[in-house]
Structures are given as structure tokens and as C-alpha cells.
Image (spheres, rainbow, N blue to C red):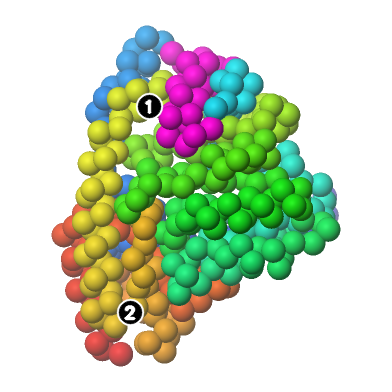
Amino acid sequence: MDTTTPVSQFVADHVRALPRSGIREFFDIVQGMPGVISLGVGEPDFVTPWNIREAAIYALERGRTTYTSNFGLLKLREAIARRVAEGFGAAYNPVNEVLVTVGVSEALDIAMRALLNPGDEVIYHEPCYVSYMPGIALAHGVARPVVCRAEDGFAVRPEAIAAMITPRTKVLVLNFPTNPTGGTMTQPDLQAIADLAVKHNLIVITDEIYSELTYEGHHASFVALPGMRERTIFLHGFSKAYAMTGFRIGYACGPVDLIEAMMKVHQYSMLCASIISQEAAIEALRNGQSATEEMRESYRLRRDFIVRSFNEIGLPCHLPRGAFYAFPSVQPTGLTSKEFAVRLLKEKSVACVPGTAFGECGEGFLRCCYATAMDRIEEAVERMAQFVRSL
């Protein structure tokens, strides 16, 4: 190779064009700053419950250190199928309709790669998790974002989806409760979206990783709607509800042909999820519900406090019905999202993520994760109030 030629020219064009994660950018900055209170990274502050950790330890002690089936341990897939049938209203065959993945992020990635041909369009709603658009681009699809608005509680309007559908549209991605807004959907609006999926022959990917963290009413699952099981890939995992982020364990459920296609991509990239994490996940499904309920109630108290506080200090904030994020508006300050976040970090040592990390329509907002201790949230809010007053 000619040593005068920059190696960057060998990077694929579609990869070069991708931005770095706005969440991780701020996380990396915070790592080198003492005294910072971080409301940035979406990770529970709870330690994984002891019985789940003990299951992982016991698996190690028994020498459970081998590969598993590409699909994952059958006993885990059976437990997943029971959980999805009981909690989400959809029945799946654990043998060939359930795939265990390395987190929900991998499940989303391999779903895109299994479904998309170059140029296929994917509709998704923004503000959204940072990997949706890049995942579409990496699979050579065309991203078509639909804007969600604060006045709608950041739900996606069926008519907004309808306006984006073209003859090239193939996939619709939903994520409720939503990261970063905590937005949720009503069953009638989900039904209207289901009708669109049938009318335009769309495949739907529904990411319901935050479903257990629904605070008012019951979580409405898209896959439970009539006729949707046959055209939907259901994604879920263990990171949020069971505080198992580091275990990197998720799953996908769907029709046989789609799960088989995803398994092929998984087979040649990841091979299988960690057997130790899979053993821990079995215990989480068997005996982890009480811990989830305790964590959810703690998050509810933190949510109520942080949202009330934001509104009191002049940062309008809707009450999120799910997940563990508040999405206050910084527009009254006259600063952009990034200006506000950078100055808040430098001047008051509080880390939040600019709303633009989650799509252009996130401008004017911040994502503030309240999955941290209440005393830290109280101190962070006080520092933010001082910062707003200084403006």
C-alpha cells in the first residue's frame, strides 16, 4: 500500500457517513471529569438482583462455559415464549420462533440485515434511540423518520406514518415506551397503525424493551393486535426491567421464516449469546418479577419529582408514562440543546444528552435519565435550577 495515501479512504462510504453516538460522546467526556452527576446514560442504578447474579455464578461453577445452539438455550426460549404469551398476548413456538440475541441492539441489527434489500425504505419515529437510523443505513436501507411532538406526549400519529409510506416502504419500526421521551401509545392508535401495515403490506419491528416500566395503566403491545403476529418481529430483553445491562441479553420472536433469516445473520456474526448470561436470564424470568416491580415503583417516585422540578424551574416537561427518561424543553432559555448541555456540564457538572442525539426533531430538548439515586437527582436538579437562573 502507498504509505502516502490516507487509510481513511478505505472506509466504506456508508460507514464514514455515520455519526458517533451522541449518548456515548457525552458519556466519554464525563468519564474524565470528577464530581459530575450524570443523567446521561440509560442504565439502571440498581445492581442486578442477587438471585440472578447467583444463577450466573452457579453456571460458572458447573462449568457452563460452552457454545449454545445458535437460537439459544431451549429452556430459555421456552421461558421467553411463556413470558411473551402471558405478558404480551402472543404465542410463539420456542423451537423455531424465538431467537436469543446479544442484547436488543443485535436483534434490531440482524432484523434489518435479514429484511432489507438496498433502497428499501424503513419508517421509524423520532426522537428515537440512537441506533435506529444507523442500523438502517448499515443494512443499505433508506431511513424515513416521522416526527413525534411533545403536545402528543411523543406518541406517533397514524396519519403521520401514512403520509410517509411510498411504494418502496417495506418496514415500520416502533418503540413504545420510547427512549428518549418515555412516550407510549394507546391501543386504538396502535390498531390504526396495524391497519396501515396490512393495507400497505409492511413488516413491523416492535421494540418493547421498556414495557415493564409502564407507570399508568397497562402496556399495549403491538404484537397482540389481531393479525399482527404474522407480520411482526417482537424485540425484548433483560437490560432495563432486570438491571442486566452488562449481561447483554435480548431476544426476538416472530414468524418462522423471519426468525430463520435473522438466525442466519446471527449465526455468521455472533454465533450465540453468552451461555452464562442465558442462564442468568432464565432465573430472571422465573423469579425476577418482584424485583422489577420494586424498581419500577422507585423510578415512578423519581419521575414524579424530576418532572415537577423541571416545570417549576422553567423547563417545560411532559409526564412520561414509560421508560426512565424525562425530555424537558430548553427552548425558553434561548440556547440550543447542545449549547445548554455543554454549558450545564462545564458550569454545573451535570451531564444530560442533547435532544439532537435522537434526531433533528430533538432540537430544543434534553434527555435526562432518572434511573439514578434520588439524592443525586435532587442535587442535579438544584444545579440545573441555578444554571437556568444564571441565564
Of residue 8 and residue 103, the one placed in the foreground of this image is 103
* Residue identifier under label 1: 285
Front-lying residue, 35 or 131:
131
| Marking on residue 3 | none
- Mark 1: amino acid: Leu
Judge left or right: residue 61 versus residue 126: left
Q: Which residues are magenta?
A: 64-90
Q: Which residue is mark 2?
A: 315
* Crowd around label 1: few <14 · some 14–19 · many ≥20 (10 Å): some
Horizontally, residue 300 falls left or right of residue 123, namely left
41 with respect to 200 (left or right): left
Q: Is residue 161 above or below residue 384?
A: above
Pick the quarter of the image with the C terminus: bottom left
- Relative to 127, residue 54 above or below: above
N-terminal of the two: label 1 or label 2? 1
| Whole-percent x, y for residue 352 in the image | 37, 67
In the image, residue 83 lies in the stretch drawn in magenta: yes
Which residue is at 38% across, 27% downward?
285
Identify which residue is drawn at 76% across, 53% down.
200
Which amino acid, by three-letter code, is at mark 2? Leu
Element assignment for label 1? helix
> Is the Cβ of the residue at disc 1 closer than 8 Å to that at disc 2?
no
Q: Residues under labels 1 and 2: Cα distance?
A: 39 Å
Residue 150, percent across and down? 45, 72
Q: Residue 365: horizontal and vertical position, in percent?
A: 43, 74
In percent of width and height, residue 39 lies at 33, 61
Residue 54 vs 106, above or below: the answer is: above
Location of residue 239 by image quarter: top left
The part of the image, by quadrant, that contains residue 131 is: bottom right
Name above or below for residue 19 compared with residue 149: above
